[in-house]
Amino acid sequence: MQVLSVTPEIFPLIKTGGLADVTGALPIALAGKGVAMRTLIPGYPQVMAAFKKKKAVYQYPLLQGGKASIHAVQIAGLDLFVLDAPHLFDRPGGPYGNATGADWPDNWRRFAALSQVGGDIAGGAISGYQPDIVHAHDWQSAMALAYMRYGKAVGVPSLITVHNLAFQGQFGAGIFGELGLPGVAMALDGVEYYGGVGYLKAGLQAAWAITTVSPTYAQEIRSPEFGMGLDGLINMRAIDLHGIVNGIDVDIWNPETDKHLVANYSAETLAARAKNRKAVEDRFNLESDDSPIVCVVSRLTWQKGMDILAAVVDGIVTAGARLAILGSGDAGLEGALLAAAARHRGRIGVVVGYDEALSHIMQGGCDAIVIPSRFEPCGLTQLYGLRYGCVPVVARTGGLADTIIDANEAAISAGVATGFQFAPNNGGALVHAVHRLVSAHANPAVWSSIQRQGMKADVSWDRSAEKYVELYRLLLSKRVA
């Protein structure tokens, strides 16, 4: 089965968050299940630099304002189509914005181009390659399904995975004339969205199937609270909606072999985590004692509930925990957390920014990781936590609720608890969860049981990849029918 994946990010080439981890791991997980996935990605500078031989398999004299070409390459075990369009993607900064963090004003054009190419490939543009299915990810590639719907690939099955419904790709109606779509597409059942053009909305409308990255999130987005204005459309498509929880790359995230760690360990050698713990204490200038270290590895944003955390850090310290925080984002939240670290020297440490190696050490050395997200389509950091014996403390929402078994009395007695859930998602409930954590941590037998149970959890892509295969087969059967 040939599947074309269209995505703005893929690990290890270009990553801003969990989307890249998913699109990088899924093709490898599918390879052993009879699915050959090729991924179309933009030719950002770091992507173009990753391969030397550049022989185009398709060329565009004009694509959204300039020349472009498609290269077929293999990098890091991934089969890729790279869209080389220098006028759109050869620029400094991140994939979506400049060094100051401001979005590129032509993002509508950049990702319309990516999507148009996805639609062209689906329609047979590349000699010798015809995908059976097209799998798009998030708003940046959602329009590929619209180009398919109104072009040559209308009969090719498609699905879109929503990694975060909050990011929708909404643009003014004035861009429509430059998209190369027929006039009938600018309609309520097409790409039109509140008088403008909605990229994600267009993909949700055109897709043969819709997936989210956890079952609970699939249900949550059917409500006005989580639907972000699209709940009406999603409810209309409810029969085509599927929730498939993400996995992680268990070769990269493996405490027994992780080269970022000061000391490797397994569920049978948890005592070895002490050296990683000491590394965390040193890096975050924390006092060395027996109290649990609770870490945060997150974007510092409202969605991630970082304002909830910032408001109760004093209560978390009073409850008997230390905090190690790694992240960046909202300037006000960065300031509030740095101020808290100044108030509680030795009890709270903050590193502003993102450091992949440090994030591994934190998972390998901290006792727990707190994730107070207001909504969380899946979440990956709690899965890393399970894998590393860094016990997750999570808000009861989305994929967090699907992947963590709360350490209530019954679950502890049965030996199945893997973390701590709290609800409602407010400061009082979060502090109460930390009190529960501190109490459990004080009982070595209970704590090691929670750690080991989490480390036994299957957080790989294996089961989830099987579910994608089942969905692909279902879509192919509809095409035949």
Image: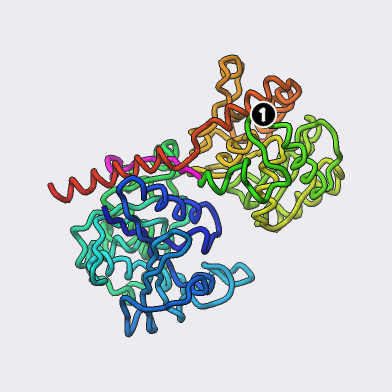
**Mark 1 residue crowding within 10 angstroms, few (<14) / some (14–19) / many (20+):** many
- Residue 456, above or below 43: above
Q: Position of residue 279 (x, y in %)?
A: 78, 46
Q: Does the segment drawn in magenta span residue 155?
A: no
Q: Nearer the viewer, residue 125 or 128?
A: 128
The residue range painted magenta reads 236-248
Mark 1 element type: helix
In the image, residue 227 above or below residue 426: below
x, y percentage for residue 141?
Answer: 38, 62
In the drawing, does residue 108 fall left or right of residue 348?
Answer: left
307 versus 425 height, above or below: below
Give amino acid for label 1: Ala
Whether residue 205 is visible here, answered yes or no, is: yes
Residue 220 appears at what percent x and percent y?
43, 39
Q: Is residue 346 left or right of residue 250?
A: right
Give me the residue at 52% from left, 52% from top.
Answer: 18
Of residue 29 and residue 469, the one placed in the foreground of this image is 29
Viewer-side residue, 237 vs 438 = 438
> Percent x, y for residue 259?
65, 50
Picture residue at 32% right of the left edge, 75% below the top: 57
Which residue is rendered at x = 82% and y = 47% of the image? Answer: 282
What residue sits right under mark 1 in the picture? 433
Q: Is residue 112 shown to the viewer in this render?
A: no
Magenta stretch contains residue 247: yes
